[in-house]
Amino acid sequence: MLKKGLLFLCLLTLVLSTLSCAPAEKDDTVTLKMWIMPNSLEPQIDIDDVLKKFEEKNPKIKVKATVIDWGAAWTKITTAATSNDVPDIVQLGSTWVGAISGMDALLDVADRVEEIGGAGAFVPASWKTAGIAGSGKITAIPWIVDCRALFYRSDVFKKAGVNPAELDTWEGFKNALDKVKKANITIEGLQIYPLGMPGKNDWNVVHNLAPWIWAAGGNFLAEDNRTPIVNSKEALKGIMFYIGLAKADYVPAEYLELNTAQVSSNFNNGSVGMYFDGPYEVKTLTTPPAQGGASEGITAGNFGVTQYPKGPTGRYTFIGGSNLGIFKASKHKEEAWQVVKYLTSDPTAQLDYTKACGFLPARMSVFNHPYFSAHPGRKIFKDAVKYGRAYPAISGWGLLEPILTRRFGIMWDYVTGSKDPIKEEDIQKQLDLAKKEIEAVLSQGKK
């Protein structure tokens, strides 16, 4: 019996030792790193909510999204691009795509575009920012779209005798401003100025002027994307019209020292009759204060939205927004592509995220959802993308925009620094200098 017992113990020990040496089940779950900017009031919660549905369908892929501030994003992303210490997926402002792509840091996914429905599935102006123009490469897929339109106070229009249809052209828009000014309207103790407009102290300096330049037939670069034409007579005409609105006393002088957020707040509080802004303003005016909105203010119950007025050569609005790129240095490119594919082409993902952040979807089919027709303001933006134009997607645009911002800022100094009429020759001088500086930058790119 003793021998049998010893034999049993030996066998048991052998079995147990074999089991303990067996390899553990391999965990092949991939965790991706993603950088985004604060696109909504609760950016971390909102992106996690959208990604949760992806992870439920793809249990072997997890996404760790990190929100980085817009002010730090450019430096952080360019540093990552040059060091290869990168996240797998990165959000890029549409005007940044050319510069980051020019650093050869992003994965070319041109051969996979058909998987997301092809170029025609996206807002046309946004798709032009998907890679460096003429390169044949696609390096950042449009994700969310920024677009601008004209917000107005319907109660102010009623008192001033303005029909929104009058705003269709430059002339009609200016006449409407004049009617509001002459009506000298006061509502709930507030003197109503016709128009809210930020000046040089705004991050949107170039974006604010672009639609007027385009509508007058001007542009920043010629079709070759190598020749600056910002000093053309057409560009001058568009700029003179826009800054002339401030000189005509349609805009409170102090507003020209404010930024977009401050002017937007003043419009929401009821101080001005008209104001240009993006689709997120509709969200703000329909969201309760407890959630960061302004739905209980006087403007919220009395606002409408219409398109930019049509200029001498047509109607245009600035198209911006953000794209999603995959870094070449990512160790999980296939999994990263599946996430980008989901966020940019899945209709539910596009709808849910645009509802959360207030921007527009990049995918055209999503505009067919009743959400974009349920509110007249959102319907206007649905139509506004047809008039959208983006800046040229070139690697040097990141260097050109600061030049334009500086020169346009000096032009605003002519508006605020004197009560005298603006001299066209002063504005032309700044545009000529801008052209020379842009030529210098572009010539460096040829070497």
Image (spheres, grey):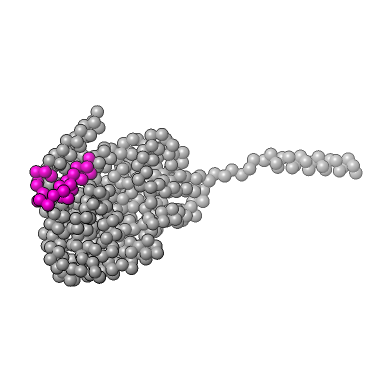
Question: How far from the left and from the top, in percent, is residue 242?
Answer: 16, 53
The quarter of the displayed image where residue 408 is located: top left
Q: Residue furthest right?
A: 1
Identify which residue, 248 or 5, lies in the foreground.
248
Which residues lie in the magenta part? 403-427
Identify which residue, 192 or 40, lies in the foreground.
192
Instruction: For the C terminus, give its image quadrant.
Output: top left
Question: How far from the left and from the top, in percent, is residue 377?
Answer: 27, 64
Which SS does the magenta portion mostly show?
Answer: helix
Residue 444 lies within the magenta run: no
Q: Residue at x 22, y 51 (%)?
A: 199
Q: Residue at x 12, y 40 (%)?
A: 429
Instruction: For the N terminus, give its image quadrant.
Output: top right
Q: Residue at x 11, y 43 (%)?
A: 426
Question: How far from the left and from the top, in percent, is residue 284?
Answer: 33, 61
Question: How far from the left and from the top, in percent, is residue 425?
Answer: 9, 43
Q: Is residue 209 left or right of residue 58?
A: left
Identify which residue, 126 or 411, lies in the foreground.
411
